Image (tube, rainbow, N blue to C red):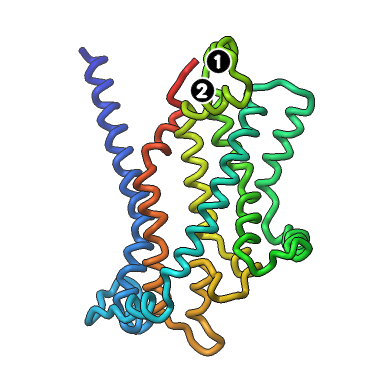
């Protein structure tokens, strides 16, 4: 009886501690977003900084974002560039991760090490070779340049997520597919990929969010204003003499909405992927 009470007491303490940390996490995550939204409704955010409520609600920043800046054009650029690059990279990485995870060949450990080492290379270190390659290919100041860069960026993280999911799939399923006459590509397409869908979708969403928020390459490779992505658009609110904070904060609120909605839609795939896989051997 005492043991049962002790277990119940420990369970209650664990639950309380868990709720406290969840609450702290929510505060850390939501406070910047709330501050940003409140500031976007102020005519002059610097006159009433912080969490002070606006004297009167000002939506001029939102109006100018849609009417004067034509933000939907830049949304289209970002959706096209991020979407196409994600499709290319996820298809390429999911197939290569299958080879590394399920097949034995010479140099396998070396390939793993080389792929994971790319996580430690900063984008600035690749500026000259990538810039030179883009110019030699003749695609500078085109959306194709960003698609090429984004499709080849963040490979290590996507590879890690998808490969770990593949490792949890029983090999008996592959053996059964081989008995039925499936080759490696057919086995991956008809058996492995459908089971690993949560891991592949998680990698795709993470890559999309990274590409959507990327600013460095977008500002370096694209100079034509009509081809800018939404993060590069934010730089237009700042000049050498003044910054339009009302318009800047309003545009930031509009820009962060798609990633938030995307995560809410695909959150179940994150939970399944991070829980270690839907199939256990």
State the mark number for residue 191. Answer: 2
For the residue pair 26 and 142, the one nearer the viewer reads as: 142
For the residue pair 21 and 167, the one nearer the viewer reads as: 167
Instruction: Give neighbour class at mark 2: few <14, some 14-19, many 20+ (Cα, 10 Å).
Output: some
Q: Secondary structure at mark 1?
A: helix
Q: Residue at x 35, y 44 (%)?
A: 21
In the rendered view, would you say 244 is above or below 111? below
Disc with the residue nearer the chain's start (2 vs 1)? 1
Residue 118 location in percent, x, y?
Answer: 69, 46
State the mark number for residue 177. Answer: 1
Q: Is 103 situated left or right of 263 in this image?
A: right
* Residue situated furthest front in the rendering: 181
For the residue pair 43 and 106, the one nearer the viewer reads as: 106
For the residue pair 79 and 7, the one nearer the viewer reads as: 79
Q: Residue at x 22, y 81 (%)?
A: 56
Instruction: Give neighbour class at mark 1: few <14, some 14-19, many 20+ (Cα, 10 Å).
Output: some
Q: Residue at x 70, y 51 (%)?
A: 121
Callout 2 touching callout 1 (CB < 8 Å)? yes
Q: Is 88 situated left or right of 25 in this image?
A: right
Q: Is 275 situated left or right of 135 in this image?
A: left
The quarter of the picture where residue 112 lies is: top right
Q: Secondary structure at mark 2?
A: helix
State the mark number for residue 261. Answer: none
């Amino acid at each position: 009886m005492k043991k049962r009470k002790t277990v119940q007491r420990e369970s209650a303490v664990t639950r309380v501690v868990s709720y406290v940390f969840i609450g702290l996490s929510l505060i850390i995550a939501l406070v910047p977003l709330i501050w940003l939204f409140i500031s976007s409704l102020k005519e002059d955010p610097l006159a009433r900084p912080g969490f002070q409520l606006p004297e009167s609600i000002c939506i001029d920043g939102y109006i100018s974002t849609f009417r004067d800046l034509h933000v939907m054009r830049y949304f289209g650029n970002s959706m096209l560039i991020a979407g196409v690059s994600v499709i290319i990279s996820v298809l390429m990485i999911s197939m290569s991760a299958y080879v590394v995870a399920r097949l034995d060949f010479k140099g396998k450990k070396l390939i793993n090490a080389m792929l994971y080492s790319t996580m430690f290379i900063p984008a600035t270190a690749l500026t000259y070779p990538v810039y030179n390659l883009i110019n030699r290919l003749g695609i500078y100041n085109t959306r194709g340049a960003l698609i090429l860069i984004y499709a080849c960026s963040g490979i290590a993280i996507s590879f890690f997520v998808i490969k770990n999911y593949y490792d949890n799939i029983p090999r008996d399923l592959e053996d059964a597919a081989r008995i039925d006459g499936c080759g490696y590509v057919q086995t991956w397409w008809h058996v492995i990929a459908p089971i690993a869908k949560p891991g592949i979708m998680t990698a795709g969403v993470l890559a999309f969010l990274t590409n959507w928020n990327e600013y460095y390459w977008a500002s370096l490779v694209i100079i034509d204003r009509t081809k800018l992505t939404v993060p590069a658009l934010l730089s237009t609110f700042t000049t050498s003499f003044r910054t339009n904070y009302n318009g800047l904060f309003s545009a930031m609120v509009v820009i962060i909405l798609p990633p938030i909605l995307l995560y809410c839609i695909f959150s179940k795939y994150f939970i399944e992927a991070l829980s270690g896989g839907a199939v256990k051997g």
